[in-house]
Image: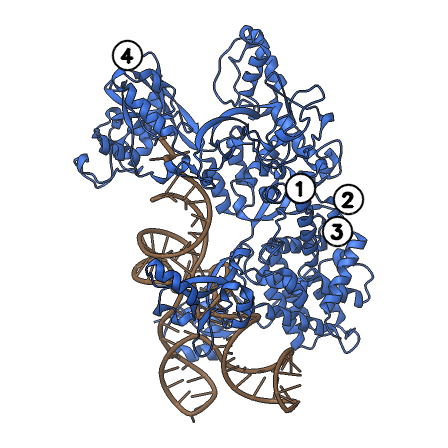
Amino acid sequence: MEYNFNKIERKWQKFWADNKTFKAEIDNEKPKYYVLDMFPYPSGAGLHVGHPLGYIASDIFARYKRLKGFNVLHPMGFDAYGLPAEQYAIQTGQHPAITTENNIARYKQQLNLIGLSYDWDREVRTCDSKYYKWTQWTFIQLFNSYFCKNSNRAKNITELIDIFSREGNQNVNAACTKELSFSAEEWNSYSEKEKSDVLMNYRLAYLSVSMVNWCEKLGTVLANDEVVNGVSVRGGYPVERKPMQQWSLRITAYAERLLNGLNDLDWSDSIKEIQRNWIGKSRGCAVYFKLKDHDETLEVFTTRADTIFGVSFMVLSPEHPLVEKITTKNYKVEVKHYIDQAKNRSEREREADVKQVSGIFTGAYAIHPITNKQIPVYISDYVLMGYGTGAIMAVPAHDSRDFAFAKKFMLPILEVVLPEGAEVSNTYAWKESRDSKEGKMINSGFLNGLEVKEAINKAIDYIERKNLGHATTNYRLRDAIFSRQRYWGEPFPVYYKEGIPFTLSEEELPLLLPDIPSYLPTETGEPPLSRAENWSTAGGYPYETNTMPGFAGSNAYSIRYQDPHNDTALVSEQANQYWQNVDLYVGGSEHATGHLLYSRFITKFLFDIGVVCKEEPYQRLINQGMIQGKSCFVYRVKQPQTNTEQQEASAEQNRETYVSFNLRKDCQTDPIHIDISLVDANNVVDIEALRKWRKEFEDAEFILEDGKYICGNEVEKMSKSLYNVINPDSLVEKYGADTLRLYEMFLGPVEQSKPWDVQGIEGVSRFLKKFWRLYAGEDSLCLDDGEPTKEELKILHRGIKKIEDDIERFSLNTCVSHFMIMCNELTEKKCHKKSVLKPLCILIAPFAPHIAEELWQMMGENSSITYAQFPEYNEEYLKDSDYRYPVSINGKTKAFIEFPLDKDAEELKKEVIENEQIQKHLEGKEVVKIIFVQSKIVNIVVK
RNA sequence: GCCAUGGUGGUGGAAUGGUAGACACGAGGGACUUAAAAUCCCUUGAGCCUUAAAGCUCGUGUGGGUUCAAGUCCCACCCGUGGUACCA
């Protein structure tokens, strides 16, 4: 019988769909296991072989867990809101919903071809109103909550209102945008608008004004990378930094919990580290500096309180509120000029010339809190308003940025930390500052002689005791800006009444995304939604016109899968109690600081308000690597630079010339990408096909080597634009889905990025054919009912053990290898015994489910292999009767000998030394000692 | 710069401190075939030795160290990849 994979795969895919084999339902008799893939954005290009890597890996795990007796939840859905569909709509006028619908259909078709065991009944789409109802609902909960720092959790905003009306905010310790102070009387006298403004300061979803890149001509906000040198990349129109009112989420309130929560997760160290860095906790000290001739104090943040005696100037951010007050008359004009300049520099420009030191003196002086010396106050844009207090104490000797500033403005450089072995030297001769936290304190009064780390603690102690400041912690993490001036996203469930935002009630959800006549922003710069007719409540109050950003829909989708059709709740308590959270999450590491952080935050919030029972959404995380493509290049010869007239003339006469790979060094060339389908395994280009492929090659001249045109290669990202995409559909057609699945795993560790090797797939294809032949005879299965031999049992049980270990460790590439070895050994033994082939079939079922199902059925089983029992290995069969231990002599392995394990040490020694083989190697030398490791003899030391 | 992570044949990659290179691709040789495809067998880290049988030396980015024993552990350096950055 032939292995007809196309027929087999179609048959079983239909069987699974018809029988809903993978439908997951709550079953309290069985333990649950939740396997999830990061859901894809359905782009127009479809899937290439890189996309399914993670899906196949998680599918293998899901299928494995089912065989292990778990009730597995393995859903899939689509992150359907996003920019490409909107841009396509702007260009073509086609509604993004239609584009998205088509792309999803194509994705589902491609995913099903691979035989993934999803429960499609639980599919979610973020653009589906039944789904985004709960995205909007979650937003409302955030709006109605504040973060209480005392209990370290979110609480209902009504509790805060209650406290305000009774005792003001004196005793309130809550996360907020800026510190306010008011009494109960004041609160009760506030207008509705004033109350709303105060509460905004505390809500977890809040409106605030933040700086954006605004392009008047294009009528839209631009991202930093869309602005270069102060003008828009598209059109070259001027861009200004402008404050705009935006919704934000107060993720910073959860910084500490997001940090601590990482410790108990089974994630890779690198991704945990990326999140830790992103949160960026730094412990330090706030220090108050009095200002000469002013009542205000200047508060700075520092992590190096030990260097306080090394302060020689202060620097404020240009946006700092005190700048205006303290600038003296003589410096007003220059300071204003500097601030104006700084304001119009985009983030990108500031980044671009980091090395450029700029700044200006304000004329003001601060008083050093310990030495009482006067210290000049400068402003400079290297100090950012967004971090710490927007002001620093500058210690040029021990901070490289302060050092550069001091050099430029000829300010004193005071050395206070002396590294071990160094001598006190003239700081003005230094080429760079000494930033290291190692060394002893000098010139620092009561800190002298201490190590830096001790000095930091002692300095903070002193500062707190004398009321000169307080210990504090800063986070790099910023609140998440949640508004987008776009069409294709979730509408905010918000309307405005006399300028005060109100949320809709739960009964009014979902607030449907309206149809609009054009997807561009309006002429007045309003977001696209303001084009919608009657975009207001029944009472005529206008709705919010911004939409939510791309990550909104993915924050709680893993929770929604648990109960996707529930109309009355995000998830029922019953469903959540059973499914809890994701046990295995598979996806790319590019979401480390986006989706993975935001959804952890939202899950913690939902935990606080009692919606879910687990605080962390994803217990174990595997980050699959990217599969790269091999790109092919031809080398176009650069035309010599001549004057224009000649060039024009020659352009008509001269055809483009391309040289073969090994000849490219002889002239100047540009590499040009060509489609990989035009090239064979030896990099020989099919020139006739190339001429037909694109016009520019039609009558080009090709300079050959050995009669062939050889192209160059490079490993790059797989992308349509680089013509190096390998499409899974054609591979399934040619080799079958089971081969593709095995090969994607066999290619290397799932976590690692690696290039797609076009030829390697032959190997697993041959293996599956061999595997089939192990069972299949001429026209029926070739099975033997006899008892397996000891030898055969050993092969089988060793295989079971290895495969189980490998899957649990997620080492799926070695798992495939071990399976191949086992099958080859059984083939060699000509073993066709049913009692061996049956467990073998189950073992491969997670990897190659179609062939496993087919053989399973042919062996006379009448139910799907999906819920078969994963075989257990028996230690008895694994015992090595014939294991030969390696014996080294002076560290070099010389012999392998058998010996029993149960003898005592002296007997063993004797036996080893007298062994014929060993004697040969000893060559009569004296044995000094014998090293045993766990009763195995390992090394003999001789003189 | 900082943080993370990796460096093993022609290639993808295996190796709880204990036979480095499993498994696979590619390559070379052979069998079957009129031929091709498919299938099967042998060789395949480098070098040496031998008529043969067998055996030897060197080898996991570089240089040190720990150990009876190091791809694996420690120290220093070089290179690649990813993240991040006037974060005080």
Q: Residue placed at 73% from the left, 70% from the top?
A: A4
Q: Is residue A188 left or right of residue A101?
A: left
Discs 3 and 1 lie in a common subunit: yes
Q: Is residue A618 above or below residue A769?
A: above
Discs 4 and 2 lie in a common subunit: yes
Could you tell me the amino acid type at mark 3?
Phe
Disc 1 + disc 4, Cβ < 8 Å: no
* Location of residue A410 in the rendering, given as x and y in whole percent from the top left corner: 20, 30
Subunit ID for the residue under disc 1: A
Disc 1 + disc 2, Cβ < 8 Å: no
Disc marking residue A22: 3
Query: Which residue, given by chain and number where applicable, does mark 1 sit on?
Result: A95
Cα–Cα gap, marks 3 and 2:
14 Å
Discs 1 and 4 lie in a common subunit: yes
Cα–Cα gap, marks 1 and 2:
42 Å
Query: Which residue, given by chain and number where applicable, does mark 2 sit on?
Result: A27
Marks 3 and 2, the one that precedes in the sequence: 3
